[in-house]
Each structure stands twice: as C-alpha cells, then as structure tokens.
C-alpha cells in the first residue's frame, strides 16, 4: 500500500497513465461509433452499391458505361457546363462573403444583419427559382421597370439560360459561404491584430499578415463546400435554365439516364463521374492551401 511518504514506483505510475489514456480512447471510440455506423449505412453502403452497379452491363462487368459517357460529346460536355456554372458562382460567393463577414463580425447589429443575409438559405432552391422567374423573366418586374425607364427597348431575358441558373446559385450559395467565413473570423483571437497594431501595422497590413494567413484553411474549406453544393445543381438548372441545351448539367444527365432511359447502371456511372470531378477539385484546392500558408490552422480565442 502506498501513501504520500511512499510514492509508487515510476514504472507503476507510467502504467497507470497508459491505462488512463487507453480508457479515455475507449470512451471516445464509443461516442464515435454511432456516427460511424450512420455514415456507413447512409453513405458508404450506397456508394459501394452504386460503384458496383456502374460497372454492370448486359455483357457483364466492364467500363462500357464510362466509355460511352466520355465518347459521347452530348454527355461529356455536361462536365464543362457544370464547372462553368459552379466555379464562377463559388468564386463570387466567397469573394463577396469574405469582406461582408469581415465588416459585420463585430458590428453591433451583427445578429440582425446575419439574419437578413441568411434568409435565402431558408427558402430553398425551388422557391428561389420561382422568385427569380417573377423578377427576372421576360415579363418580370425588372424587365418592365427597364422598359418603363426606356433603358431597354425589348424584354430582358435573364431566365431559361445560363444567367438564370448562375444567379440562383449565387443567391442560394452566398449565405452558406457567409456563415462559414463568419464563424472562422469570429474565432480569431482579437489580441493578434491588436498586437500587430501596436507594432505599427495598418488595417490593410493586419488583414494581409494576420487575418488572411489564419483564414486560408477556412477559405479552402468554405470554397470546397460551396463548390460541392453548386456542382450538384439540379432544380435551378431545370426551372431557370435550358435543360436540353446550355444548362444541361451532369445531374440532369444522371436523372435522364435513370428515370427516362431506365438505365440505372449508366446513371450510377454518371454519378460516380460527378463525384470524381468534385473530388479532383477539392483535392486540388486543399493541396494549394499548403502553398500559401503552413502553420497553425487557427488563432482561436484563449
């Protein structure tokens, strides 16, 4: 039996520390297990099933579906159409969200401003599309207003084309990017820019040398999540675009293969290609993040 005057040997203390660490890890593993099972049930199993199904053809397992997709220009071009919509929309959302989040992070009416700015995310893409049809259609309010002011001699066509889908992605994606960047900005310790200011750094230099390096990881994550959200566009491309022409995105190609042609293996192959393109962009962005900044991923408040 040990007491204060007779401490346990060093080896025994080390064994107790190791046992305590193992017990904590076991408890953490038990907490993670439900989430892990949910991911396996709702993501991993359907993904594996879809991957196997994408190689299934009437001739057996082969790459026929992938070869058919990439050899058909009408199908292959859906990748570039989707990228041409999602990448600019993501860049604009991040570009506008960053300065607005930076200005409103300590504004006295931050909660009110945040509530107003995130209203579009509560409406849903279908309701946003219906609203844009009323505002931006050939007989919409904007077109009538421009004709009334003699700024346009004919109705303005901003729907059923590229611009209708693009504006919908901006409206629905901006609140998402804004909330992500606002959370990163408010998590930066205010003592860091204050210390830089005492050393003579101007607000511009504080942003470039203090805020921006700490925001690089957050910017990369916000870009990736916003891009994935925009790349999966479907309702807007149907309601506001031309799904048989300029805005035939890859999700429409997958839908048509599954529910019009009833070719589920081809639809699965298109979905896997869609996931592959998103993965390439995400890996590229996360890889470029390391070129700009290496160090702590945040300057959180103590």
Image (spheres, grey):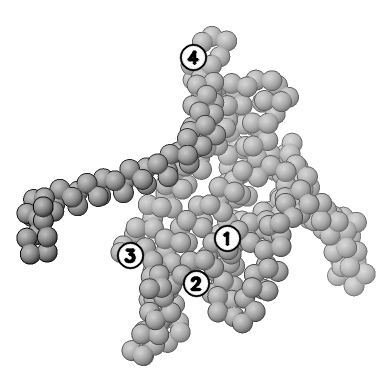
Nearer mark to the viewer, of 1 and 4: 1
Q: Nearer the viewer, residue 176 or 67?
A: 176
Rendering quarter of residue 82: top right
Q: Residue at x 69, y 20 (%)?
A: 262
Q: Position of residue 201 (x, y in %)?
A: 38, 86
Q: Is residue 8 left or right of residue 125?
A: left
Distance in Å between CA atoms under marks 3 and 2: 16 Å
The quarter of the image holding the C terminus is: bottom left
Q: Residue at x 72, y 43 (%)?
A: 235
Which residue is tagged 3? Answer: 296
Q: Which residue is mark 4?
A: 61
Q: Secondary structure at mark 2?
A: helix
Residue at numbered disc 2: 186
> How far, Cα to Cα, is label 1 from label 2?
14 Å
Mark 1 and mark 4 lie on one chain; the one further toward the N terminus is: 4
Report whether residue 222 is seen.
yes
Q: Secondary structure at mark 1?
A: helix
Asked where in the image residue 92 lies, by quadrant, the reply is: bottom right
Q: Secondary structure at mark 4?
A: strand
The crowding category of the residue bearing disc 1, from other C-alpha atoms within 10 Å (few below 14, some 14 to 19, many at least 20), is: many
Query: Which numbered disc, 4 or 3, marks the residue that appears first in the sequence?
Result: 4
Q: Residue at x 36, y 84 (%)?
A: 196
Q: Earlier in the sequence, mark 3 or mark 2?
A: 2
Residue 146, compared with residue 236, is above or below; it is below
Residue under numbered circle 1: 177
Q: Is residue 216 above or below residue 127?
A: below
């Amino acid at each position: 039996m040990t007491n204060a005057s007779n401490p346990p040997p060093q080896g025994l203390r080390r064994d107790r520390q190791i046992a305590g660490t193992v017990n904590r890890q076991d408890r953490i593993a038990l907490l993670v297990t439900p989430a892990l099972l949910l991911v396996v049930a709702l993501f991993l199993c359907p993904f594996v099933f879809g991957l196997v199904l994408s190689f299934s053809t009437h001739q057996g397992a082969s790459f026929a579906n992938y070869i058919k997709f990439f050899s058909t220009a009408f199908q292959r071009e859906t990748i570039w159409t989707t990228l041409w919509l999602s990448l600019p929309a993501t860049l604009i959302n991040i570009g506008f969200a960053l300065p607005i989040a930076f200005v409103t992070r300590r504004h006295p009416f931050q909660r009110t401003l945040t509530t107003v700015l995130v209203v579009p995310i509560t409406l849903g893409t279908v309701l946003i599309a219906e609203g844009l049809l009323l505002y931006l259609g050939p007989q919409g309010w904007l077109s009538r207003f421009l004709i009334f002011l003699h700024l346009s001699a004919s109705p303005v066509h901003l729907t059923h084309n590229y611009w209708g889908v693009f504006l919908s992605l901006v409206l629905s994606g901006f609140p998402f990017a804004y909330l992500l960047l606002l959370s990163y900005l408010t998590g930066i310790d205010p003592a860091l820019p204050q210390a830089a200011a005492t050393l003579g750094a101007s607000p511009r230099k504080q942003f470039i040398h203090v805020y921006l390096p700490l925001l690089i990881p957050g910017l990369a994550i916000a870009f990736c999540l916003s891009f994935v959200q925009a790349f999966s566009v479907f309702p807007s491309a149907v309601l506001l675009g031309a799904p048989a022409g300029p805005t035939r995105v890859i999700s429409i190609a997958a839908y048509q293969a599954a529910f019009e042609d009833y070719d589920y293996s081809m639809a699965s192959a298109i979905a896997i290609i869609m996931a592959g393109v998103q993965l390439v962009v995400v890996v590229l962005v996360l890889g470029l993040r390391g070129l700009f900044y290496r160090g702590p991923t945040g300057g959180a408040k103590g």
